[in-house]
Amino acid sequence: MKNRHSTRNPVPVLLAVAALALLAGCTPDAINAPDDVTAPDTPAGVLDALREAYESMSIEAYADLLHPDFRFIFADPRKAPYAREDDLASTGRMFSGVDQKNSAGGDAPAVAGIVFDKLEILEGWERVSGDEVDWSDEPHVMRALIDYGFTLNLKSGGRLRAAGHQVVYACAVEAGIRFSTRYWRWQLLGQRDP
């Protein structure tokens, strides 16, 4: 008489045991969270991430926040908009902590820290329509008018203050698919002086 267990294919049983062992070590957060759990999941989260990147002076966090099509549009129409690379270079100089030259060739003193005292939405988020954002093909773009104010604490002991209003543009981009669920994150698509 043959032993029944010796002729059974062990592969399906081993695969089931391995799958259970893998799942036993996972928490629901690890299964359901996108890879970058710090990515903004709302347009308002973009402003929170912007504040955090500036106050920590983290060029990596700032770069992660900027959409590949990012544009900074100045109020002066004679001044060309900054593309993402231009903005990262300018902000990187500010975050570097060493004396620099600004884009106009003037002295830019070393910044020791940045503190926001104000970063708030004046008008609620609204969907962008028409060709207002003509530098990108992103379909889900929102804009808001913000009021900002921050202080640059200089290594020399001085302070510089920046304050004003800007229009910010945020867009939803797909962050990935995990277990048949799509995850979205919001990125900063642009800033415009009013």
Image (cartoon, rainbow, N blue to C red):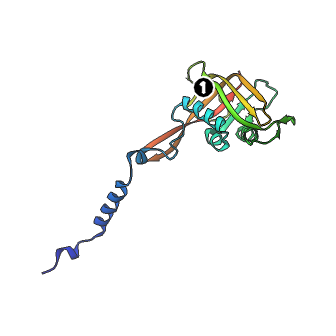
Residue 139 higher or lower than 33, as above or below: above
- Is residue 131 visible to us here? no
Residue at 60% of width from left, 23% of height from top? 120
Residue at 67% of width from left, 30% of height from top? 115
The furthest residue to the right: 105
Quadrant where the C terminus sits is top right
Q: Position of residue 92 (x, y in %)?
A: 73, 41
Which residue corresponds to mark 1?
143
| Image side of residue 24 versus residue 151, left or right | left
The furthest residue to the bottom: 1
Residue at 65% of width from left, 29% of height from top? 133
Q: Position of residue 111 (x, y in %)?
A: 75, 37
Q: Position of residue 85 (x, y in %)?
A: 72, 42
The furthest residue to the front: 157
Is 50 or 116 nearer to us in this picture? Answer: 116
Is 153 or 53 nearer to us in this picture? Answer: 153
Give the image quarter of residue 84.
Answer: top right
Residue 125 higher or lower than 51, as above or below: above
| Image side of residue 122 versus residue 178, left or right | right
Q: Where is residue 124 in the image (x, y as percent from the top left)?
A: 56, 20
Give the image quarter of residue 32.
Answer: top left
Residue 166 higher or lower than 103, as above or below: above
Q: How crowded is mark 1: few (under 14 residues within 10 Å), some or many (20 or more)?
A: many
Q: Under tag 1, what secondary structure? A: strand
The furthest residue to the top: 123
Give the image quarter of residue 46.
Answer: top right
- Is residue 169 visible to us here? yes
Disc count in the image? 1
| Residue type (three-letter) at the residue carrying disc 1 | Arg
| Image side of residue 132 versus residue 109, left or right | left
Quadrant where the N terminus sits is bottom left
| Image side of residue 186 versus residue 155, left or right | left
